[in-house]
Amino acid sequence: MIEKLQKILRKHLGQGNESRDDEGKELQLATATLLMEVARADNRISEGERQDVRRLIEKHYGLSPELTREIASSAEHKAQHATSLYPFTRLINHACSPEEKVRIIGMLWRVTCSDGHVDKYEEYLVRKIAELLYVPHREYIRMKLEVLDEPAAESPGFSSQDGALMDQGK
């Protein structure tokens, strides 16, 4: 209720564009923070995971490399100090369509697979985030399989935490 009143006041006071810009930056940071959370779920963030987070954010939001680095750096700091996923998922739930949320789950899967294996803690965290974003289980699985079917995931060294090869038969 209070948020609606604030939006109305901003609109009538001419602060609507600034507010939308701020909301866009907050959404980018929230998404990047979730990506960093998944990257650090196995207690380490590789440089490859950092690069993938930056690449995904830059591509998804059409940002400049400089702004992307700034957001990724802030997101890594926020991920290290966050005590809950809720503030980030709440913002995404408020600002994104169901299709956009599914794309974010796909981005999370790409980060999960970027270091060459799927760690059970990373997989659990992607599932938890999907639930918090109200992404249906079938969409969660579809995105997982789509990412695992991508050529980078089919390299000979790609494996799950238990050591089984994730060969998709291609």
Image: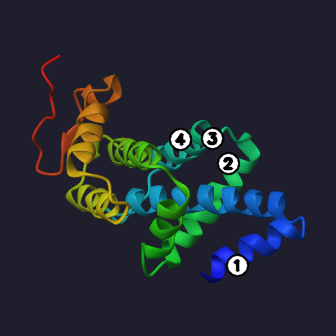
**Closer to the camera in the image, 32 or 167:** 32
| In contact (CB < 8 Å): disc 2 and disc 3 | yes
Give amino acid for label 3.
Glu
Q: Earlier in the sequence, mark 4 or mark 1?
A: 1
Would residue 33 be seen by someone viewing this image from the given angle?
Answer: no
- 3D distance between C-alphas at marks 4 and 1: 34 Å
Residue 58 — which label? 3
Q: Is residue 49 left or right of residue 142?
A: right
Query: Which label sits in the foreground, 1 or 3?
Result: 1
- 3D distance between C-alphas at marks 2 and 1: 32 Å
The residue wearing badge 4 is 56
Q: Quadrant of residue 133?
A: bottom left
Q: Quadrant of residue 23?
A: bottom right
Give amino acid for label 2.
Thr
The residue wearing badge 2 is 68
Relative to residue 17, is residue 59 depicted above or below?
Answer: above
- 3D distance between C-alphas at marks 3 and 4: 6 Å
| Quarter of the C terminus within the rendering | top left
* Residue at screen point 74% across, 40% down: 64
| In contact (CB < 8 Å): disc 1 and disc 3 | no
Mark 4, other Cα within 10 Å: few <14 / some 14–19 / many ≥20: many
Q: Earlier in the sequence, mark 2 or mark 1?
A: 1
Q: Is residue 158 left or right of residue 4?
A: left
Give amino acid for label 1.
Leu
| In contact (CB < 8 Å): disc 3 and disc 4 | yes
The residue wearing badge 1 is 5
| Quarter of the N terminus within the rendering | bottom right
- 3D distance between C-alphas at marks 1 and 3: 33 Å
Q: Is residue 113 left or right of residue 32?
A: left
Relative to residue 147, is residue 3 depicted above or below?
Answer: below
| In contact (CB < 8 Å): disc 4 and disc 1 | no
